[in-house]
Image (spheres, rainbow, N blue to C red):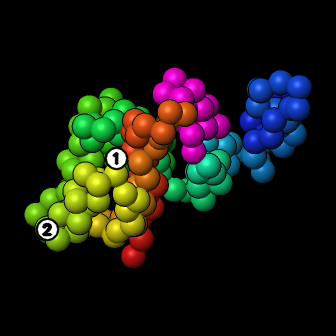
Amino acid sequence: MLNIPAFAYQEEKERPVTAPLLCWDIANPLLEKRIHIQNDIQQIDRLAHRYDWQSDIDFKSLLIESYSVVVTNLSQEIVWVSQSFQSMTGYDATETTGKSPAFLQGEKTNLQTKQFIREKLVKLENIEARILNYRKNGESYWCSIRIFPIQNSQSKVTHYIAIEKEVN
């Protein structure tokens, strides 16, 4: 029998609960996604603990709904990306870490949208925009993006978190 993440927490312990896999034919299509989501949640929790973040973003729900998560530092360098980001763009984490998310933009990306995002980032304001990005294979896609400055317990902004999803 194989145990899989069940997305619940035991009251006494801060560990994910697992549930037995009873039928492979039913679980197989969703198993990989559930494992990726659980791994992403654990990574976000580690980052939140490391940087003492204060956030009420429900990452679990967003990841279950196939949103991508990107964490950047204040220099706008990518610190971490979710598995769904990797699936959406074709870039794996090692290819994105240390780069600005602007590397996804290209010749048809709207300059006004780029400027709007830059201005809001400088002001440490929440951002909501739709932008044309490019996958690793060069294919363009429209991306709905929400960016939030994240504060630590001393109310100092330490990072940005972008929530992204491909849209029509």
Residue at 25% x, 37% y is 75
Q: Residue 108 placed where, x, y %?
A: 14, 69
Query: Height in image: 99 above or below 63?
Result: above
43 inside magenta stretch: yes
Prevailing secondary structure class for the magenta stretch in the rendered image:
helix
In the rendered image, residue 91, in percent from the top left (x then y), is placed at 32, 42
Which picture quadrant has residue 8?
top right
Q: Earlier in the sequence, mark 1 or mark 2?
A: 1
Callout 2 secondary element: helix
- Determine whether, in the image, residue 48 is placed left or right of residue 76: right
User: Which residue is pictured at 14% across the width and 68% down the height?
Assistant: 111
Q: Which mark is residue 90?
A: 1
- The secondary element bearing badge 1 is classed as loop
Q: Quadrant of residue 146?
A: bottom left
* Residue occupying image coordinates x 27% and y 41%: 76
- The tag on residue 32 is none
Amino acid type of disc 2?
A: Leu
* Marker disc for residue 111: 2
Q: Would you identify the image quadrant in which residue 167 lies?
A: bottom left
What stretch of residues is rendered in magenta?
Answer: 38-55
State left or right for residue 127 relative to residue 45.
left
